[in-house]
Image (tube, helix red, strand yellow):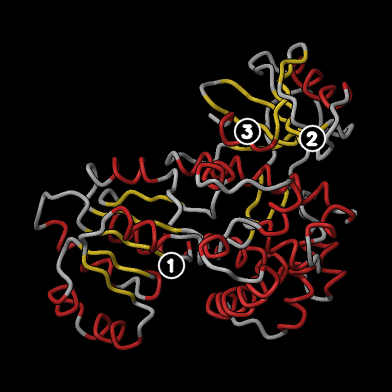
Amino acid sequence: MIPRKIQTELAQLAKEYKVITITGPRQSGKTTLAEMQFPDYDYVNLEDPETRMLAEKDAKEFLHRHPAPVIIDEIQRLPLLLSYIQVECDKSNKKGQYILTGSHQPALKAGISQSLAGRTAILQLLPLSIAELREAGIIMERDEYIFKGFMPQLYEENIDVTRFYRNYYMTYVERDARQLVNIKNFSAFEIFLKLLAGRIGQLVNLQSISNDVGVSASTISEWLSILEASYIIFRLPPYFENFGKRLTKSAKIYFTEVGLAAYLLDLENPEMVTRDPLMGNLFENMVVAEALKARYNRGKDAGLYFFRDSNNMEIDLLQSAGRKLYPFEIKAARTYSNDFAKNIKKFRQLNNKTANGAVIYSGEQEQNVGEVELLNFTSTGNKIR
């Protein structure tokens, strides 16, 4: 099992809260993390029909059979149980008694807001980061990372990459989508998902996608929410401030797991990634996801944005931290060009609280180039504050 960066935060929260809720994509390692951090806890999985039936029919008996401290897996399958956990928590002052894991945000959020507000800490566990892989002795080339992705099972078991993502898509994406909403035209939904993979890092244009898929814009909006709730995609919002110019208001779309995006683009090996016209988009997706993992692994909100004005002056990634803005330009190239930093310099003239910034690229050389830092993409997580 590969150690996770989020373990430090998880251990600290278990000293402060009675309940810890770990959310994230399916197979991102939530159960493994909980069992690795709390090996002496009882474990119960609500995916098991008999277990879930007991918890649904007689929650008190269920909790009697599985007393704290306990790990309850797939808690989103029975949000009603959260009310009974609240009652049990209020009987004791002990911390870290219930470790809950789940994959769907809406059901968990609703249940937590109704029953566990103020009693639980929430952690979001995404797939493995490059830093976690490297510390485990797994070092690959740029396009290998993109093709293989970061799902823990791929590194812990000898599984064919394409077969893994095919099964992941069929078993989890389709099932989760069907659980969250009644999709009547599933073939259109599949087309929609592949179209999204082809639009990584682009602004969300509901009408354009609607025209391409052949369903209404409101349906596209609903489907995007489904994918976001299932941690299949995430949105990078635009940064707003009064710069005296008309700014972009739409978010950008990225896949939580870049390996799934590569699969949806029919890329069958790293060499195909290298030659693909969307390689730059996939690289950007990987880097932005690395930044998001770094924030979540420290128990922080995303705090990540992009910037684009009416003149198409754009900063690929902005981090807001400590009243400072940290701009990052993301380039898949292996050789640095002075043009890479030009938008960072322009942005710094617009906002006096902007730090020097960095260019994240595929080259090996890391150094300061004037007021801009040059970073290899494997260092992304280390630079996010």
What's the residue type where badge 1 is placed? Ala
What's the residue type where badge 3 is placed? Ser
Q: Residue at 66%, 45% (x, y): give it.
A: 236
Of labels 1 and 3, earlier in sequence is: 1
Q: Residue at 22%, 51% (x, y): give it.
A: 96
Q: Position of residue 201 (x, y in %)?
A: 77, 49
Foreground residue among 114 and 187: 187
Please tell me how crowded label 2 is: few (under 14), some (14-19), or many (20+) other residues with Cα within 10 Å.
many
Foreground residue among 366 and 227: 366
Residue 379, disc: 3
Q: Position of residue 286 (x, y in %)?
A: 68, 48
96 relative position to 379: left or right? left
How many numbered badges does the structure rendering display? 3
317 relative position to 123: left or right? right
Element type at mark 3: helix
Q: CA distance from mark 1 to mark 3?
A: 35 Å
What's the residue type where badge 2 is placed? Arg
Image quadrant occupied by the N terminus: bottom left
Of labels 2 and 1, earlier in sequence is: 1
Q: CA distance from mark 2 to mark 3?
A: 25 Å
Residue pointed to by mark 1: 107
Residue 308, disc: 2
Please tell me how crowded label 1 is: few (under 14), some (14-19), or many (20+) other residues with Cα within 10 Å.
some
Q: CA distance from mark 2 to mark 1?
A: 34 Å
